[in-house]
Image: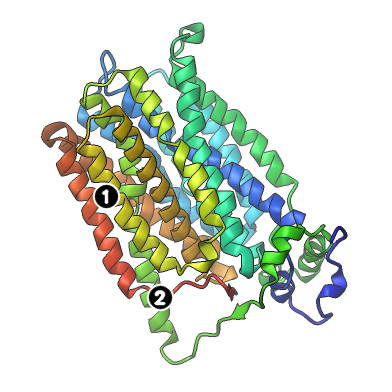
Amino acid sequence: MDGGTGHNAVSAGASVAQRLDNLPVTRLHVAVVAACGIGMALDTFEISFGSILAAFFSTPPQRLPSAQLGALLGAVYVGAVFGAPILGWIADRWGRRNALVGVLLWIAVMSMAAAFSESVQTLTLFRALAGIALGAYPPIAVSYMADVLPPRSRGMLMFGGLSLAALGPLAAVFLVRSVQPAMPWASEAWRWGLFAGAWGGVVIAVLFACLPESPRWLAARGKSSDADATSRRFELSRVMTRLAVRSDRGPAVAVHSPGVGKHTRQARHWICVGGLFLLSPWSTATFPVLVGAVLGQMGFKLSDTLLFLGLGTLGPFVGTLLTATVVDRIERRLTLAACALAMVAAGFGFVASKNPVFLVGAIAVFNLFALLYLQSLSVYGAEYFSTERRASAMSTAWALNRIGAALSPLLLVPMLREAGPVPMFAVIAATLLTSVVVLAFAPAGRQRSAIR
């Protein structure tokens, strides 16, 4: 099909939610996914500076004391603990798209300020301020996509967009590594990476300003005429034929929660989802950040450390793209448990080896499954919350994630320096195995369900 989907494709009396759920995949859907994915790449670009800064400030002549380095690495997550719930509430109150534009502009301003920092203390402060928005972007972007994407292709499209997150660390590491030998204007290489992140935030904010607001959110806020007009934009957008074939295989399955025990069931679901988010950063965030410090402690030069970090980010991008084609066929909890166990194996392989080839391979495998785990958890959580509270609920879950991410460097950096990488990773492995236990009690995923 080359034409639009046509407003006649849905009944005149259909709700906005039904109209969105019954659509095939259109170019406007793909534009939303692309913008969210590019924004995720920027978010991980900025977050990945933890590993870069860990490498720079773990080697002479800039080697920092453990407490100071731990504070620098954890600062971005401290900001997220406070920023994510507030910005999530704003997204539920004022709109997904508007919140995303504001978040990206905030990231741009704080990244530019961090690039001009004259002391580690000032850098730590601006990293914390940047974290206010960096922690809020993923849950709001996931909520935006969950609002507008057809349920039959939701997992595939969200994984496809979120796979771009793997490009952020790759771009950050190789950008800094390429600038490092030249030192333009006698400025440290990490500063140029933060400059690039600042300009990226401005450009992506402009992209979001060109996209429509979530029709589902507009309808939930009682803005019926705006919701109808925005729904028509999706309905009149040109169909992506190949993706539409996948999305039309069967009707969306509506899920109706029985009244008996509903609140008890929702509370249990929230505890499980919140617990998974609280446990996840010890592996998905802290371990990748500390890889640079581990390599430095093993005796590798800074240039070699940056090279290993860069090569280790290549696998996740390809792997997540391939996984996107099958993710809707696998139950979410099974995906999460498999990723957790794979991270345990890859992590112990990393800390037990000193061969460069094995090290790069272990980093790549760990980063792949860490990214798959975090993406699966984001989709899994977003599918459970209603439109009225999806952004705030997801942002609160992400705040729990950032609490773990802020605390873990403070514990694990001293442990790494005093006891070595094996005890450090044993703690990380324990959180992963605990997550598998939580998943055994968690509710099943809703990858083919119409969401509210």
The quarter in which the C terminus is drawn is bottom right
Residue at 71 percent across and 65 percent down: it is 245
The residue at the far bottom in this view is: 260
Query: What residue is disc 1 on?
Result: 345
Q: Quadrant of residue 269?
A: bottom left
The quarter in which the N terminus is drawn is bottom right
Q: Quadrant of residue 118?
A: top left
Query: What residue is disc 2 on?
Result: 443
In the rendered view, would you say 43 is above or below 33?
above
Residue 26 coordinates in the image, percent (x, y): 75, 59
Frontmost of labels 2 and 1 is 1
In the rendered view, would you say 8 is above or below 301?
below
Q: Using the image, tell me which numbered label, if any, was put on residue 416.
A: none
Q: Is residue 121 visible?
A: no
Which one is nearer the viewer's eye here, 382 or 9? 9
Q: Is residue 157 visible?
A: yes
Q: Between disc 2 and disc 1, whose residue precedes? A: 1
Residue at 28 percent across and 56 percent down: it is 432
Q: Is 272 left or right of 31, judged from the image as shown?
A: left
Which one is nearer the viewer's eye here, 224 or 437? 437
Residue 433 coordinates in the image, percent (x, y): 25, 59
Residue 147 coordinates in the image, percent (x, y): 63, 64
Residue at 40 percent across and 71 percent down: it is 270
**Label 2 to label 1: alpha-carbon separation:** 26 Å
Q: Is 124 left or right of 5, judged from the image as shown?
A: left
What amino acid is at disc 1? Ala
Q: Secondary structure at mark 2?
A: loop
Residue at 21 percent across and 55 percent down: it is 430
Characterize the local packing of mark 2: few (<14), some (14-19) or many (20 or more) Cα atoms within 10 angstroms.
some
